[in-house]
Image (tube, rainbow, N blue to C red):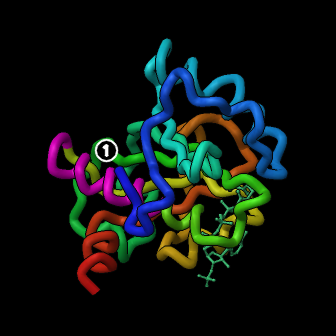
Amino acid sequence: MISAEGEIRIHRLESNDDCSGFRSGKIDLDCFFQRYAGQNQFRHHIGTTYVAIQGDCITGFVTVSSGEMMAEELPKPLRGRLPAYPLPILRVARLAVDERFQGHGIGRLLLRAMLELALEMRDRVGCTGVVVDAKPDAVDFYSGLGFKVIELVSGALGDRPEPIAMFLSIRQIVAARVG
Ligand SMILES: CC(C)(COP(=O)(O)OP(=O)(O)OC[C@H]1O[C@@H](n2cnc3c(N)ncnc32)[C@H](O)[C@@H]1OP(=O)(O)O)[C@@H](O)C(=O)NCCC(=O)NCCS
């Protein structure tokens, strides 16, 4: 994937990418990126990380995996006539931009790339929307892209209590793309 800007490239994490200098200001995210993103992707296959690169520098990353949720976990207006069994989703597990590059549209660019990936999933294997586990101070960032807070049934997306689950439906992604 390549951004419209041309100078920021987004690609799947590669084993020779140097993650060591990345600092987002959130130690847990930096630690995940430097220690676990690679092994989760290359060894365990439990999530895939995409990096934004400017020149030789990794300016941001986003980690996604496939997941599922129940229609009853969605607010009524979003539920529509979805069936009452687990629904496929794309889960944004982690997203961070290096402190030096925050506020320049890279977070949004990475997230938009993942919305495109969700559309690809829809066509290839089925996908009803995107779920993010938002840190409390990033909720407004996701709201700005149309995500809505949802109440997940405990354990549906892991057992970390702290993040706030937010959802964006495939229908909304398509509408935003067209509009
Ligand atoms: C949250 C984060 C990923 C946003 O990335 P970014 O590249 O700095 O954000 P962008 O420049 O793409 O911002 C896009 C829009 O969101 C807004 N925004 C960015 N961060 C925000 C925040 N924390 N709260 C509210 N709005 C935010 C911007 O002002 C911008 O709005 P505008 O287009 O109206 O000007 C980044 O600041 C970050 O890595 N923070 C530390 C780690 C973190 O909290 N990650 C989220 C984990 S769930």
User: Of residues 117 and 93, which is closer to you in this image?
Assistant: 117
Q: Residue at x 32, y 53 (%)?
A: 118
Q: Residue at x 42, y 62 (%)?
A: 6
Q: Residue at x 35, y 65 (%)?
A: 169
Residue 19 versus residue 58 in the image, above or below: above
Location of residue 141 by image quarter: bottom right
- Determine which residue is flagged by label 1: 88
Confirm whether residue 153 shows in the render.
Answer: no
Location of residue 81 by image quarter: bottom left
Q: In the visual, does 45 lie left or right of 166?
A: left
Confirm whether residue 128 shows in the render.
Answer: yes
Q: Residue 98 lies in magenta, yes or no? A: no
Residue 50 versus residue 17 in the image, above or below: below
Q: Which amino acid type is marked by label 1?
A: Pro
Rendering coords of residue 179 (x, y %): 28, 87
- Residue projecting furthest to the left: 123
Q: Which residues are magenta?
A: 111-125
Rendering coords of residue 177 (x, y %): 29, 76
Q: Secondary structure at mark 1?
A: strand
Whether the residue carrying mark 1 lies under 8 Å from ligand 1 is answered with: no
The quarter of the image that holds ligand 1 is bottom right
- Main SS type for the magenta part? helix
